[in-house]
Image (cartoon, rainbow, N blue to C red):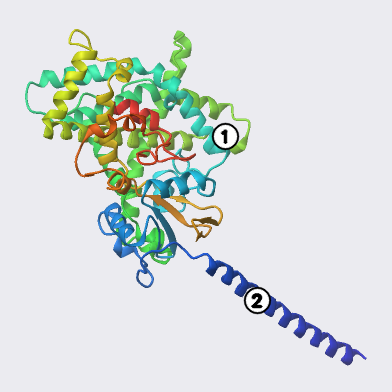
């Protein structure tokens, strides 16, 4: 009896196992069949192991623009083990950032950049979409980046521009304009973020050292790190980027720790003498000290990571955009003359320009927009990653696929911008052109990205550049 029962049970187990394998196999076939009916977007085949990584070259935005001309506005590449979708036209950017934006709310946080430079994705840029990210964005908007905060700190920006112009005038000789711009931007941000100027006048040792760190950070963060896409070789750090990032982060962390410590002492002194003006770090420290919800509680790491965001991206991108605008006006003297004539008519020569005048200076605003178009500070927007599979124009985009928008390619698209290599503010002086704003609603001009994860500092970027 026992042998019979055992034999019967064995047969049942075999049948059960066979059934399981068959069902599993058929399910896989069906799923693959369904997936095959929704192909991936077109794109280059790439190479074994590394995929399309070698195709990116030294200027990925240019390489991807050339590939998009062959494969289309929505393109798929395999980089190592990672899928990447690239949008290269205004319409494809709208589809992916707006219509399907809910599928791309997170960023790839396991890369070396977020893990090292952003304190393990503890900042405003790379933090996962959720309570902590919303809290940081809300506080930064209220304290610095939102319309009310920008209006509250307008006098500070005016003061720093005046300081810069006077310092340049005192030199009385040829000078490095970028150094002055960088110092002015850092001090504008410093006054609003930590309540004080953070750099000496341009030319000082502290200014040069800080600018070197910022430029190195922005350069390093913009490089394609092979280890991010081929995890098996990440430990080898083939390009040395990991070592550079760790060395740089150590230097920056010392600066942010010192700034935060000094600020807490200054906060105590302000309470004693009755000073009331609140800066952004005051707000973040208050969140840290009165955190009730662990899910969105602010820590010292968050504060230092946000300082890293604001003082690096905020200074470098703004100063480089202004440099490009000045360069284009010097090369195109007629544009400079027209801008001067507009300012003479609206402002005159008996007083200084105020931010309130800018809305009456359409040609000046057009110069700013044209600079954003031709010289975006981030040619490729920071990557996002899909949190769920989605279908876009008949294509299947799997969960875990990265998304980048080629902002540079959109600004050079001849179907949107005739003669795209020509710097022409007149594009934005037509009836339709005047309506185009760089705030994420007009996808032919998205220097700050678009959607819920667009650059939190977009308003500040426009204010600083104009």
Observer-nearest of 346 and 81: 346
| Side of 397 relative to 460 (left or right) | right
- Residue 283 locus on image (x, y percent): 49, 24
Left or right, 265 with reference to 318: right
As helix, strand or loop, the secondary structure at mark 2 comes to helix
- Mark 1 to mark 2 CA distance (whole Å): 47 Å
**Residue at 68% over, 79% down:** 21
Describe residue 196's horizontal placement relative to residue 108 as left or right: left
Which of the marked residues, 1 or 2, is nearer the chain's N terminus? 2
Q: Quadrant of the N terminus?
A: bottom right
Badge 1 marks a residue whose secondary structure is loop
Q: Position of residue 19 (x, y in %)?
A: 73, 80
In front of the other: 374 or 179? 374
> Residue 342 occupies which quadrant of the picture?
top left
Residue at the location (48% across, 57% down)? 401
Is the residue 69 above or below the residue 453 in the image? Answer: below
* Quadrant showing the C terminus: top left
Which label is found at residue 26? 2
Q: Is residue 188 visible?
A: yes
Which residue, given by chain and number where applicable, does mark 1 sit on? 297
């Amino acid at each position: 009896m026992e042998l019979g029962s055992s034999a019967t049970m064995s047969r049942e187990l075999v049948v059960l196992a066979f059934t399981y394998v068959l069902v599993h196999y058929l399910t896989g076939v069906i799923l693959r069949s369904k997936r095959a009916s929704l192909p991936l977007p077109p794109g280059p085949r790439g190479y074994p192991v590394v995929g399309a990584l070698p195709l990116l070259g030294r200027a990925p935005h240019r390489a991807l623009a050339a590939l998009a001309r062959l494969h289309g506005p929505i393109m798929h590449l395999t980089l190592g083990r990672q899928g990447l979708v690239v949008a290269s036209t205004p319409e494809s950017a709208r589809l992916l950032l707006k219509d399907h934006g809910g599928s791309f709310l997170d960023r790839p946080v396991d890369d070396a950049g977020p893990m090292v430079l952003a304190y393990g994705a503890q900042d405003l840029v790379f933090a996962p979409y959720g309570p902590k990210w919303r809290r940081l964005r809300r506080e930064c908007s209220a304290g610095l980046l939102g319309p009310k905060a920008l209006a509250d700190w307008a006098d500070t920006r005016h003061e720093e521009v005046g300081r810069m112009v006077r310092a340049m005038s005192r030199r009385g000789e040829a000078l490095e304009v970028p150094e002055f711009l960088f110092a002015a931007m850092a001090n504008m941000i410093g006054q609003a973020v930590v309540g004080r100027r953070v750099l000496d006048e341009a030319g000082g040792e502290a200014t040069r050292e800080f600018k070197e760190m910022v430029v190195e950070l922005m350069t390093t963060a913009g490089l394609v790190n092979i280890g991010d896409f081929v995890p098996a070789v990440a430990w080898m750090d083939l390009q040395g980027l990991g070592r550079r990032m760790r060395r740089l982060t150590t230097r920056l962390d010392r600066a942010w720790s010192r700034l935060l410590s000094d600020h807490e002492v200054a906060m105590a002194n302000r309470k004693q003498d009755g000073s009331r003006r609140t800066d952004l770090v005051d707000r973040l420290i208050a969140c840290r000290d009165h955190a009730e919800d662990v899910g969105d509680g602010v820590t010292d790491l968050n504060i230092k990571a946000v300082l890293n965001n604001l003082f690096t991206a905020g200074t470098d991108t703004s100063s480089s955009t202004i440099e490009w605008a000045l360069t284009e006006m010097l090369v195109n003297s007629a544009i400079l003359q027209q801008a001067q004539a507009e300012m003479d008519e609206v402002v005159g020569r008996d007083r200084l320009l105020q931010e309130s005048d800018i809305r009456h200076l359409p040609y000046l605003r057009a110069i700013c927009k044209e600079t954003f178009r031709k010289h975006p500070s981030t040619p490729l927007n920071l990557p996002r990653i899909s949190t769920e599979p989605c279908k876009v124009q008949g294509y299947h985009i799997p969960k875990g696929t990265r998304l980048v928008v080629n902002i540079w390619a959109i600004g050079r698209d001849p179907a949107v911008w005739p003669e795209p290599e020509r710097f022409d503010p007149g594009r934005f002086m037509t009836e339709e052109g005047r309506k185009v704003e760089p705030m994420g609603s007009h996808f032919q001009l998205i220097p700050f990205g678009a959607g819920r994860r667009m650059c939190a500092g977009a308003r500040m970027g426009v204010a600083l550049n104009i």
